[in-house]
Each structure stands twice: as structure tokens, then as C-alpha cells.
Amino acid sequence: MSLSQLARAIAESPTIRLNEKARLLKEDGQPVIHLGAGEPKSKIPIDAVIAASAKLTTADVRYTPTDGIPSLKKAIIKYTEENYDKGVAPENVLVSGGAKQALDVVLTTLLNQQDEVIILAPYWVSYPEMVKMKYGIPIIVTPEDGRFHPRIQDIEAKISSYTKAIIINSPNNPSGLVYNEKFIAEVIELCERKGIYIIMDDIYHRLVFDGYTFTSCYKYSKAELDTSKLIVVNGVSKAYAMTGFRIGWVVAAKSIVDVMINVQAQTTSCPAMVSQAAAVGALNGIQSGVEALRVFLQNNKKVMMQELSAFEGVRIEEPGGTFYCFPDFSAYSKNSNALSELLLEKAMVVTVPGSEFGMEGHLRLSYCGTVKSIKQGIERIKWALDPNSPNEIYIGDRRMVRDWK
């Protein structure tokens, strides 16, 4: 059987693979602790539940307009005004089946074969593969100082005549870093000067902590929206804990959205009606759940930092947002894939290898679970890796002895 070279070249998603392994272990009764999760565990907003239920009880769930139902586009316009201080029109908005699909439609719309997209390391695992699936070339920019914050001169050095776009994700998955306002201003100025598309992945923008603030990209854009190459991707998955509803959106110039509508029409036709109704409920409803989730994550982050700070040999930069941190475990192993497999096999802890995010030796750890799971998870990791830690530990109801180096 002959399969496409492109499809065979696309890497497996490590988060999905590890989630599946963890699921199978849990089904087998194993005491797995999941520190790799990419979704909050809080309940979805009651307004979303009510709105989805109301639509279902009509028994009239049909196709919708390709670009989204008018009530949801109206809610997104309001959301953009309140969170970005930017007025947009319905023709500037496209609703998709999750922010991931929204980004995919953006890339399909923008890229020609061999076009280059600048991606800042550490990056979300899917960015490079999504670019490759459009026959584009991902160009990775890694900070020279080994830290997480990119420098504008490093980006400018990577720009070529083939550069079509740059993807900015702040707060950042996997590091939790919030890019500073000066950097956002510099990137927008550079891209507008060079005629490069700026794709802002803002899916975590409301989950910031400890005095950090989100910088609206529109604050520094000098172009009018309908002539701008600034594209904003967002959705309800993270801040509203609605990962399963798969609703995201794009705000961009009408000329870009018009083409995106054609792309989406020929692929998925439209987002699901019930999910769109739920998103309307979430965006228009009581917003206290978002703040409750933010405070919960901020407290969990402090617990995670406390536990990691007592872990000799681990270097960590404290995150300013999201629900991830990205500690450096290279003192124990420079092969993060092997390290992640070891921790799952020996300690029953799920982590995500840093190599998938463009930085070897790191592991992405999530703190969106319980305080108990954070403390026990780090205790198990320390037992598995640190020869100075106690040689025995209970994992579930089993006494385990560290018998490897």
C-alpha cells in the first residue's frame, strides 16, 4: 500500500501518545499521575451547559453558516472589544472547530510551497508539523542564552525573501512565559515593516499570574484592520475549560477571512451547532469561572515551584501564565524522550518530553490537576531520578525500591 510522503513525514503527537498510554494504564488499575495534561479539570460554565441543552432540546440541530452563527460572532466581537480594546465587524471573524483548526485554516490560506514560517522555541508541538502539512518550511528561532524569551535581533536574522509569517504564542505553551510588552511592540513593528503576517495564538491570554499582564497586539499595530496582516487566533478551550466542545476563532482582515471561509467550507463545512451555542453561553454568561480558574492555577503554580525548588539538579524559570512549566532536567538526562518514558514506566507519572517543543533536556509539567497530584508526582519523579532521595516509595499500595542508576 502506497501512502503519501507528506502524511508519512508528519510526526506523531507526543501528548496524544502519552495520554493514550496513561489512559490504558489507568484502565488497567495503575496509579498513574498525569502531569502532562493540556486541559483544565474545572467544570465548564453553567451558562454553556444551559445554552447547549436548550439547543439540543429543540431537536433542531443543523448545518450553520461556514463562518459561524451570528450570535457567536456577535459574542466574539464583544469579547474582542473587552479583552483587546479593538472594534471588529462580523466579516472579520471566522469560527472554527477549535483554535487548532482555526490555525490550520489560517496556514492553508497563507502558505505556498516553500514559504517559511518563523516559530519561536520553545513552541507548541504542533506548529512545525502544521506548517509542513501545508508544504511550508518551519524556521525555528531559539534564544542564544538558553532561556525562553526570544530577542528581536534573533528573529530578524532569520527573515528571508521566503518568510511569509511568524507565530507568536504568549503566554507560551510549554514554558508559561509571558512575552514582555516591548517585545510584542518590536515584533509587530518588524513584521509590518517587512510585510510579514503575524499570527497571534492567544488561547491562554486570560490565564496570567502574579502581576503579569497580557499585551493586546492591536495596541502597537499601525495598519487598519482590513489592510492588516495581523491575525488573532483564540477559543474557549482553555479559559473556559471547554476543550471537548472544539470552538475557536480567527479575527483578521476581511480579505483573509473571505478566503478562509472557502477553505473551511471545503473541509469541515461548519463548526458544530451545539458547540457554538455552548460557546455563546460561555462568552455572554457570568465570567467568574475564568477568574476562579486563574486563581486556582496561580495557587497550583506556587505549589509546583515549591516542590521543584527543592529538587537538586533541576533548573526552572517560573511561569507567568498558562498551566505549564518547563523545567530543565538535563542534569539527569539530555534525552527527554527516554526520560519521559522512564518516569512513566518506573514512577507512573506522565510528562511531555521537551524535544517535542524544540528544547531537549526539558520536560513539560502541567499543574492544572490537584495539589495532591502535583506533590505526589514530583515526589515520585525525585525518587526515580535523584540518587540522594529515599530509596523506597509507595506508588499506590505497592512499595517500590529504586534498583537502577
Image: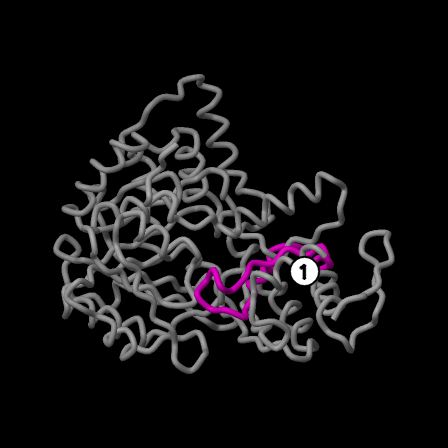
Q: Is residue 8 above or below residue 266?
A: below
Left or right of 1, for residue 218:
left
Left or right of 230, for residue 177:
right
Please, which colouring scheme is shown? one colour
In the depicted view, which residue is nearer to us: 9 or 14?
Answer: 9
Q: Quadrant of the C terminus?
A: bottom right
Which amino acid type is shown beneath numbered disc 1? Leu
Q: Please identify the residue farthest to the top as the structure is shown.
A: 59
Left or right of 138, for residue 369:
right
In the depicted view, which residue is nearer to us: 340 or 150?
Answer: 340
Query: What residue did someone put label 1 on?
Result: 343
Specify whether residue 296 is in view. Answer: no
The residue shown at (65%, 79%) is 313
Residue 219: say if magenta.
Answer: no
The residue shown at (29%, 30%) is 269
Which segment is the magenta one? 346-373
The residue shown at (60%, 58%) is 351
Tag 1 secondary structure? helix
The residue shown at (45%, 78%) is 147
The answer to which image quadrant residue 81 occupies is bottom left
Q: Is residue 130 above or below residue 343?
A: above
Q: Position of residue 338 (x, y in %)?
A: 60, 62
Q: Is residue 382 above or below residue 70?
A: below
Q: Quadrant of the N terminus?
A: top left
